[in-house]
Amino acid sequence: MSGLVGKLDPRRIQWGSTWNTFASRVLRTKPVESMLDSAMSGTGSHGTRLARVLSTVDLVSLGVGSCVGTGMYVVSGLVAKEMAGPGVIVSFIIAAVASILSGVCYAEFGVRVPKTTGSAYTYSYVTVGECVAFFIGWNLILEYLIGTAAGASALSSMADSLANHSISNFMISHIGTLNGLGKGEQSYPDLLALLIALLVTVIVALGVKNSVGFNNVLNVINLIVWVFMMIAGLFFVNGENWDEGRFLPFGWSGVMQGAATCFYAFIGFDIIATTGEEAKSPNTSIPYAITASLITCLTAYVSVSVILTLMVPYNEIDADAPLMEMFAVHGCMFAKYIVAVGSIAGLTVSLLGSLFPMPRVIYAMAGDGLLFKFLANVSSYTETPAVACVVSGFLAALLSLLVSLRDLIEMMSIGTLLAYTLVSLCVLLLRYQPEGDIHGFVNFLSEEQNNKRKEGVLAECEKDACSPTSEADEYGGPPTNTCGAKNLPSLGDNEMLIGKPDKNAYTASHPNYGTVDMTTGIEAEESESGLSRRLKKLIGPRYYTLRIRLGLPGKMDRPTPATGKTVTVCVLLLFISIFAFCSFIIFGASSIGEGRWWALLLLIFFIIFIALLVIIILQQPENPKRLPYMAPCVPFVPASAMLVNIYLMLKLSAITWIRFSIWCFVGKGLTR
């Protein structure tokens, strides 16, 4: 006993080595180069190979199909009836803005880390480390698991509605009811949803080409039915359904609560990001597919919501099958059955789109050793992660059997919002890191180690510059910079850490390639963002004066480890501040509305502090590397995405957060 107490003595614990071990485990990142080398050699990032067969059209079809099905045929009616009324239109627009802000960040990551699977899981692994990556990956599995179960439950509800609720009545009378899985309401074990989920699992496991072909056919049917609904619905619209305060019956609070649930309807674009290892040209296909999917889905949702709320008063909408029943209310039964065909196609393709990426995230995590290794097995016949397909499909089927549709939708929203928030955070971090630290900037060296390394490199540079055989002598003139390079544009303070350049130093792999004119050393005009060029034309000569007064970096400034660390600290403080700010304006809304001095003072403090952090980030130099696609208006777009996503997360119900916490606790128990 005394020996045990002695071992636990704090004075005998080597705190430094213990912390370093913990930090290396939690913060270690996965180098992008290893994944790209695997892709170049014809294998995946885990030594296996998935079929590279998806075109841009296939990716757009996957994204649209996974969104439009359940979102259009179920979510629109649910939110209109119980949360926002006709204001569901505004809810969809707000959710779309949040999705677009996150979508551009996803698109940049899809280009920055191409030819990989795992979506936000992989992105966070190469950026902020293993601990956050597991947390994100585990919640992506939750998102797709619930999306699959919700799709199966929605299909079952639609079939029950077509059969005049005879299926549910049969289940309740012969099997019984379940109590307590939802919010206290009674539900029945949905065996039909179980069978639907298992059937779609078989389709996904048969191969990616078969799955996408089936998806494309269903999307064409869905498009035809959508056009029919827009035309036929115009004959039954009634403007009185929006009169006398009926447009916002639950106020703006209901609109925002509806937006948090509507966000579920825009999750398709992160499904696109999981296909990098199976896309033919991920560099161009992924950004284009994400943008096209979001625009298409927003158009579909707004148009359907307008027709629905003008045809039927919001309090009379059928929450289970709103688009079918809106024609039945007006006695147009043939239209109801045409919409039923579209519902079957739309909900099936939505279910397929949710199940399709889940095995790929599991495959990526298992290949990295964060889940059971057997889940990374790839079938040589179908070239898909077959074991992960079967396991994920079975779990989704079990969930659809036991849990109600509304609870599934809310649980899915919280996992999606969290993943989008952290992807936006990662983009903001990466933009301001020096090229050498881009894949491991969280593992900061101590000041002593940094100084020793710099001293060694500087000494080597001085030796080369003064050597009679250096390249400075070879060109017969005095060196124009500290390391003896021949009349090349200075790279700023970081130049001393580069070492001796050769004659062909400015190649496509050089960090300044494409940003610096080779003859003048002036940064190329094309490297400026569109926003910078427009501001320059608008302000004129005062543009440069304004930049100097705001402390913005110059064209030739490059990020250093010090500026990268400054941005990292500011981004973490920004995340905490936004979370506190959103919590305050949601839970302290009554105090703010009453004009209490302390509430207004705290509100002003949060706004000023968040603005100050954004300005400090803006004053740091960005990495000059140009990508085929980059998120615009950094740091404003990622910061806005974090603000909107965190606000929508906090608008979800308390029971949703409790279930989410339980899921995270279970995931922690599975880690080694």
Image: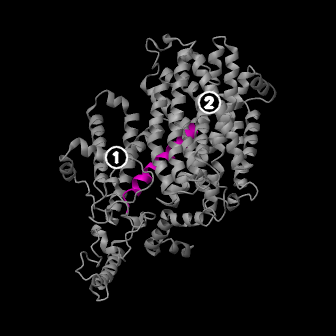
* Residue ID at (70%, 30%): 344
- Does the image show residue 132? no
* Residue ID at (46%, 31%): 93
Q: Nearer the viewer, residue 567 or 636?
A: 636
Disc on the earlier residue, 2 or 1: 2
Q: Residues within 10 Å of mark 2 (few under 14, many from 20)?
A: some
Name the residue beneath numbered marker 2: 223
Residue 301: x %, y % from top left: 54, 29
Residue 231: x %, y % from top left: 58, 19
Work out which residue is located at the far right of the displayed protein and give it. Answer: 174
Q: Tell me if 543 is positioned left or right of 648 in this view.
A: left
Q: Amino acid at mark 1?
A: Gly
412 in the magenta segment: yes
In terms of image quadrants, where is residue 160? top right
- Asked if 353 appears above or below 520 in the picture, the reply is above
- Does the image show residue 666? yes
- Label 1 SS: helix
In terms of image quadrants, where is residue 625? bottom left
- Magenta: predominant secondary structure element? helix
62 in the magenta segment: no
- Give how far apart the Cα atoms at labels 2 and 1 are: 35 Å
Name the residue beneath numbered marker 1: 530
Q: Residues within 10 Å of mark 1 (few under 14, many from 20)?
A: few
* Residue ID at (50%, 47%): 287
Q: Nearer the viewer, residue 358 or 479?
A: 479
Residue 430: x %, y % from top left: 41, 57
- Label 2 SS: helix
Q: What colouring style does the render use?
A: one colour
Q: Tell me if 522 is positioned left or right of 334 in this view.
A: left
Q: Which residues are magenta?
A: 410-433
Q: Amino acid at mark 2?
A: Leu
